[in-house]
Image (tube, grey):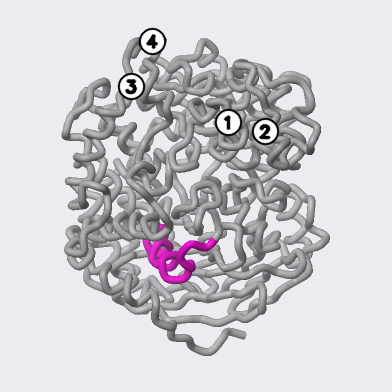
Amino acid sequence: MFGYHGKILLIDLSSREVRCEQLEQSVLQAFIGGTGLGAYLLYRFCPAGVEPLAPANPLIFVTSPLVGTRLTTSSKFAVVTKSPLTGFIGDSLSSSFMATELKKTGYDALIVTGKSSSPTLLSIKGGEVEFLDGQALLGLTTSETEKAVKQRLGHSTRVMCIGPAGERLVRFASISNDGGRQAGRTGPGAVMGSKNLKAIAVRGKSPAAVYDPEALNTIGDDLTRRSLGPATEKYRTLGTVANVSVFNRLAALPAYNFQQSTFDGAEDVGGERLHQSHFVKTDYCANCTIGCEQIVVTTDGGPKSQGRMEYESAFALGPLVGVSDPNAMIRASHFCDEAGIDTISAGVTIAWAMECFSRGTDFSRGTDNGFLGGAGVSGPPLRFGDGDALMECLRQIAERRGLGDLLAEGSRRASEIVGGGSGDWAMHVKGLEMPGYEPRSLKTMALGLAVSTRGACHNRSSAYEADFSSRVDRFRVDDLRGGITADGEDFSAVLDSLIWCKFLRKAFNDLYAESAEIYERVTGWSMTAQDLKVAGERINNLKKLFNIREGWQRSDDTLPARVLEEVLPTGVAKGIGLTRTDLDMMIGGYYRARGWAEDGTIPDAKLRQLGLEALVSKTAQPSTTVAAPG
């Protein structure tokens, strides 16, 4: 077999049983790898209705056929689980050398279930799995954990781990690897923590062979040249933080908990200022020729903090919480990486709390529900623009102390506990906090956020691209948005399953056709552009099918009350809003474009068309196993 190993490794932390299972070629071709194969495995191995933090919820790590080929930007892996924030499918991607090391284990995916009786370091070395004592790692930050594991098992070992936030089951905890790279969104770190699993150390020795290496080298050289062209120039100069000033001009930059769409201090925390005053170097993901990461450092004479900065972190820990001090923003972002916290969910949840303070919200119900330590809100009040209060709040979240214990539940649960109408300004979809795109001035993006199976996500459809193009009027709603969003989701599913970095997407002349050829050169299996398009559709339908099984209802496809009831007060979008009627109209168009029923469910005919009907019935069948490794 080429490009794949055709096997998955299943590890039960409770029984310490290790076994492997074969994957059929038809499954690999149908779901490709990455988030696609991860969705398939989650549907098969996740018990219906399981609590996300229960031992039976699988934590799945998946590579792809492109990982290990040295094609530019292909060194990514997916983490898939049932999200403790949403209760629906949770998937996250990380770019790192860990991806290539996972691929060299000889498996296409690792599936971890159960719960260890004590803190555990899981070691996977070649085909051998060891359950090592992880007690000494407890309380360490992500970088400290990685350093300690490497000292113990060798510096060539790749490590993924949780920080203090994951240990304490912060529902938006991340999984860190390769010096702070994060599988951040949807709370996989909390699932890892719930299993008493502090870290996973990986050393592989079984790379997957490539079917036609000579042809692939030629294709790869050409793709590398294109990756250094104008399509990626923005990422190679200022990185994604350049979006701060761009979005501010377009009135698409959420500020003060989405109460405004522009921010007076945007210039201070934007890419240009960071590059001029805080820039240290450009960093690269494994096997990447683009180099979008900006490493920045504080310069104010306070405690030094240095780390990577990208747009979503800058938005969430800057404008959204009213902070215009770049040093405070850099410290907050670096702290999140060290504690193992998703910066978006952290910033959006804290912004909700800041607005609660500004409105005089009564937090006493948090005490009644077992939060706030029975002593109410401790420390100074949270105010927009207060960088010191932001840092203290992040510390409290990571330690689940005081107000942080409540906020560690995420904005949806926190607002449900506190009540008092605070859910109206809890900015989430399906429990996942909103990214840095103002939906009232980006109508296609609004639809993409509302219907995303992951919750409020900008990466699983890239619907904002249509709004920033000449294809549509971004301020108006129309019936074109449904098809555009569905197509964008399918396109993104192919990217996230092969796995390509999204920053490379515009370097392709025809992503489907070129990727199909590359797939054939890697695997030796037939693949057409149309096959890949259908695979993208199949993957998104399967994700929706999982959510339906876990309790999804039509009412879950919506946006926060603020977006649907308030107009924008500032910038070129002043007075622009989005009504529930308009959103429902676009959602109806999306369902029709998908071939779904009016209530958003998937007809049997669509399942048969995509070959998913057999999967639904097969999940009840026992799996076929082969001899356990080691």
User: How many residues crowd around disc 1 within 10 Å: few (fewer than 14), some, or many (20 or more)?
Assistant: some
Left/right of residue 330 with respect to residue 36 in the rendered view: right
Using a 10 Å C-alpha cutoff, classify the residue at mark 3 as few (fewer than 14 neighbours), some (14 to 19) or many (20 or more).
Answer: many
Quarter holding residue 213: bottom left
| Segment colored magenta | 34-50
Q: Earlier in the sequence, mark 4 or mark 3?
A: 3
Quadrant showing the C terminus = bottom right
- Secondary structure category for the residue under label 4: helix
Q: Give the spatial CA distance, label 2 vs label 1.
A: 8 Å
Q: Could you tell me residue 446's position as x and y percent?
A: 33, 32
Mark 3 or 2, nearer chain start: 2
Q: Helix, strand, or loop for circle 3? A: helix
Closest to the camera, between mark 3 and mark 2, is 2
Is 24 on the left-hand or right-hand side of 203? left
Q: Tell me the distance, in whole angstroms, between the alpha carbons under discs 4 and 3.
A: 10 Å
Residue occupying the point 58% across, 20% down? 355
Q: Which residue is mark 3?
A: 441
Given the image, on which type of amino acid does mark 1 rest? Gly
Spot the residue most to the bottom.
627
* Residue picked out by circle 1: 419
3D distance between C-alphas at marks 4 and 2: 37 Å
Q: Position of residue 628 (x, y in %)?
A: 56, 86
SS at badge 1: loop
Q: Is residue 498 visible?
A: no
Q: What's the amino acid at mark 3? A: Ser
The CA span between labels 1 and 4 is 32 Å
Q: Are marks 2 and 1 in contact (CB under 8 Å)?
A: yes
Q: Residue at x 52, y 14 (%)?
A: 267
